[in-house]
Every structure is written in structure tokens, then in C-alpha cells.
């Protein structure tokens, strides 16, 4: 008889993942996902609204970037088409800056207006067919732009939660092929994030150590198989409790709660580890869509005003998550995952970590 599947609990979300390793071999999983991606490429919008020269197709920019310099429209007026990166509000924003929150109860339900921000960050004037075309400098630029916009939006204490979300590669839901990221700032902290903050605080209360710092130490001493790549400042690893195949976390080795507080000298080391990890992910899973998110502590101004999370700075630790989209897994288990609240992962984290680590390049490029 074969070994039973393992259950592992995510200490942040407290969700359980079933490691269904007999269901499909990692190589087969990847091969099937690739064949789906190749046979169903996205249809591109024509003309591309995010290309230089088509600025009128989007709302006016918030800022542009050229030669390493950031230029705000509010200070300098319109920038035209001469840019290397451009940030503007989403045309159909989930959250918008204009208006009042209007917190109220309607029939006993909590209701408020979706005030906040939803910005599009176009990091390059060019279309990039694959990750092989992405220079490390572009990752560096993206990190700087995320930090810039998050810092600017954090001055509004009403905006409690910020998140960056990026999709790279083939994606069937969107007809925009131009690379871009989305930044959200919301007037409430979502429940999943709340729970994570609570578990981090609980861990800190009990042990006087940050949960993520403990994870990094564990990666150095015990779970080395899960490690993908690292330098003096950042470590990339597949968490021991990863709910998704080939999910990678990139975390600063030094404790830091808030991404917007990342110092200048740590942007380059962060870009280095992220860029090498993305290269390894593409080598292993091919030209699949990859989602990147930055999970950072809630706006400290917002938290301070509400008089809670006083230990946030000590117990929360920001991270960047890289999530290859393997539609095969969703197809196999969607009903079970939606219906039961378990996650199912057919690839053990230490197997995924070993495969990715073997695919990491030398770091030059
Ligand atoms: Zn374009
Ligand atoms: Zn920490």
C-alpha cells in the first residue's frame, strides 16, 4: 500500500492543504498546463491602449518615469508620449479616490463606498513575449514604482490596505498583452489579511519572535530543500505549507513589516532574487501566466488612528508571492476546494523547491 497523503497547515491562514502527490506527477502537470496555454493564446487589443502614443485611450497619467527620474503630472503637467514607465488610474476602477466613504448600516449590514485607489503601472513601453526578454532592470524599476505609489497613497489615513498585483505571461481573461501591474488601496482590511495579522500577532505574543523570521531561520537550518535562491538580503523559497504548486515567497531576511519602508540599498538585492526566481519558474513551468503579489502590513497611519495593531511593526513581515497559474490543478480540484475550504496541491513543496533551485541561473544578465 502507498503512503497516505500529507496534510499541512498554513500558519498564516490556518488553512489545510492536502498534498495529493499520487494524483499527477510534477512533469505531467507542467506538460498538461503548457499544452493548454499554447493552444489558447489571448487575443490582443488593437491598437494597444498602453503603448506610447495611445495615452488618450487611458485616463491622464499620475506620473511617468524616464531615465530613473519620476515626474508627477500634478507638479509638472502632462508628460506626452516620451516615457519609459507610466502610472494612471484604472479606467474602470474597483476603488476610486473621489467621493466620501459614507460608512453606514443598511438593514443591519455594513456598507461603505469603495473609496480608495486602483492604479495601472505600465513598467515598460514595449511588449515582452516571454520572461527571457525581461531585463533585471525592469524588475528593479517595478519595485521602485510600487514603493513610490504606496508611499504616496499611505499619506491618506483612510486607506488601510494596499496591495500590488501583477500578471505576467499568457492570460486568457484579458485582451491587454502589454505588461502592467495593478495597485489597490482600500478603505478596509480584507478578512483574509485580518486573519493573517491576527495569527502573526498571536505567534509574536507567545514567542516574542516574528512568524516570517522564524520561517527564514527554518529555511536556513531545516527546510533547505524548499529554498530556491537567496542573497545577503532576500530569500526565495517554496513554503513548507504551500497551497499551490510552485508557489514561491520572496522575503527580506531582515525583519521589515512594510514594503513602502524598503530602503534604497535593498531594492537591487530584492530585484536580483525576484528576477532569478522568475527565470527559474519559467524554466520549470514554461510560458504560463504568473501572478505576483506584494503582501504588506496595513497602512501604519490607518492602524495608528484606530488604536490597534500596536505590535504590527514587530510581528508582521512583508513578502512578495510568485504564483504560477496551473489551470490543470484548478480543473482537477475546483469543486472540492470551493466546497470544503481545503487546498489541494499535487506537488510537495520540497520537490517544487528542488526543481526550481536546479533551474536558477547564475545571476548574471
Ligand atoms: Zn502596448
Ligand atoms: Zn520578521
Image (tube, helix red, strand yellow):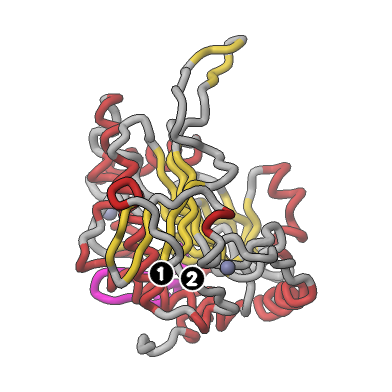
Q: Quadrant location of the N terminus?
A: bottom right
Tell which of 230 and 83 is nearer to you.
83
* Residue 241 seen in render: no
Residue 196 relative to residue 55: left or right: left
The quarter of the picture where residue 63 lies is: bottom left
Which residues, given as a range, are shown in magenta? 223-239
Query: Among all residues in the image, which is located at the extreme right?
Result: 39
Q: Is mark 2 within 8 Å of ligand 1?
A: yes
| Residue 33, above or below 5 | below
Residue depicted at x 30% and y 72%: 67
Query: Badges 1 and 2: C-beta atoms under 8 Å apart?
Result: yes
Residue 303 locus on image (x, y percent)? 30, 32
Secondary structure of residue under mark 2 = loop
- Residue drawn at the location 32% of the way across and 62% of the way down: 144
Spot occupied by residue 156 in the image (x, y as percentages of width and height): 32, 34
Task: Answer left or right for 210 relative to 58.
Answer: left
Q: Earlier in the sequence, mark 1 or mark 2?
A: 1
Alpha carbon distance from label 1 to label 2:
6 Å
Q: Residue 64, image x and y in percent?
A: 38, 60
Q: Nearer the viewer, residue 86 or 28?
A: 86
Q: Quadrant of residue 66?
A: bottom left
Rendered-image quadrant of the C terminus: bottom left
Q: Residue at the spot x=36%, y=74% of the render? A: 273
Q: Quadrant of ligand 1?
A: bottom right
Q: Any mark on residue 84, and which?
A: 1
Q: Is residue 194 visible?
A: yes
Q: Is residue 99 above or below residue 209?
A: above
Q: Which residue is mark 2?
A: 125
Question: Does the magenta-highlighted stretch encompass residue 227?
Answer: yes
Amino acid at each position: 500500500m502507498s503512503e497516505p497523503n500529507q496534510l499541512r497547515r498554513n500558519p498564516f491562514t490556518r488553512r489545510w492543504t492536502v498534498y495529493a502527490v499520487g494524483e499527477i506527477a510534477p512533469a505531467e502537470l507542467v506538460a498538461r498546463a503548457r499544452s493548454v496555454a499554447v493552444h489558447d493564446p489571448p487575443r490582443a487589443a488593437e491598437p494597444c491602449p498602453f503603448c506610447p502614443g495611445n495615452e488618450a485611450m487611458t485616463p491622464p497619467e499620475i506620473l511617468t518615469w524616464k531615465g530613473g527620474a519620476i515626474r508627477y503630472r500634478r507638479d509638472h503637467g502632462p508628460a506626452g508620449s516620451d516615457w519609459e514607465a507610466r502610472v494612471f488610474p484604472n479606467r474602470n476602477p474597483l476603488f476610486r479616490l473621489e467621493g466620501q466613504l459614507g460608512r453606514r448600516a443598511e438593514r443591519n449590514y455594513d456598507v461603505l463606498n469603495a473609496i480608495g485607489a486602483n492604479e495601472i503601472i505600465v513598467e515598460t513601453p514595449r511588449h515582452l513575449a516571454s520572461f527571457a526578454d525581461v531585463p533585471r532592470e525592469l524588475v528593479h524599476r517595478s519595485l521602485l514604482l510600487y514603493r513610490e505609489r504606496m508611499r504616496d497613497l499611505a499619506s491618506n489615513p483612510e486607506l488601510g490596505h494596499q496591495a500590488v498585483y501583477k500578471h505576467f505571461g499568457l492570460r486568457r481573461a484579458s485582451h491587454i498583452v502589454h505588461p502592467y501591474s495593478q495597485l489597490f488601496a482600500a478603505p478596509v482590511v480584507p478578512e483574509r489579511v485580518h486573519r493573517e495579522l491576527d495569527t502573526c500577532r498571536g505567534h509574536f505574543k507567545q514567542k516574542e519572535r516574528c512568524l516570517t523570521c522564524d520561517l527564514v531561520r527554518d529555511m536556513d537550518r531545516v527546510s533547505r530543500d524548499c529554498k530556491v535562491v537567496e542573497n545577503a538580503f532576500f530569500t526565495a523559497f517554496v513554503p513548507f505549507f504551500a497551497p499551490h504548486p510552485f508557489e514561491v515567497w520572496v522575503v527580506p531576511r531582515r525583519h521589515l513589516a512594510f514594503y513602502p519602508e524598503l530602503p534604497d540599498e535593498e531594492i537591487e538585492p530584492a530585484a536580483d532574487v525576484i528576477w532569478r526566481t522568475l527565470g527559474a519558474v519559467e524554466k520549470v513551468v514554461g510560458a504560463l501566466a504568473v501572478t505576483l503579489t506584494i503582501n504588506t502590513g496595513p497602512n501604519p497611519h490607518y492602524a495608528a488612528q484606530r488604536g490597534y495593531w500596536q505590535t504590527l511593526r514587530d510581528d508582521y513581515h512583508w513578502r512578495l508571492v510568485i504564483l504560477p497559474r496551473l489551470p490543470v490543478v484548478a480543473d482537477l480540484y475546483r469543486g472540492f476546494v470551493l466546497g470544503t475550504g481545503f487546498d489541494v496541491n499535487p506537488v510537495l513543496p520540497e520537490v517544487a523547491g528542488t526543481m526550481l533551485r536546479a533551474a536558477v541561473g547564475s545571476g548574471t544578465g
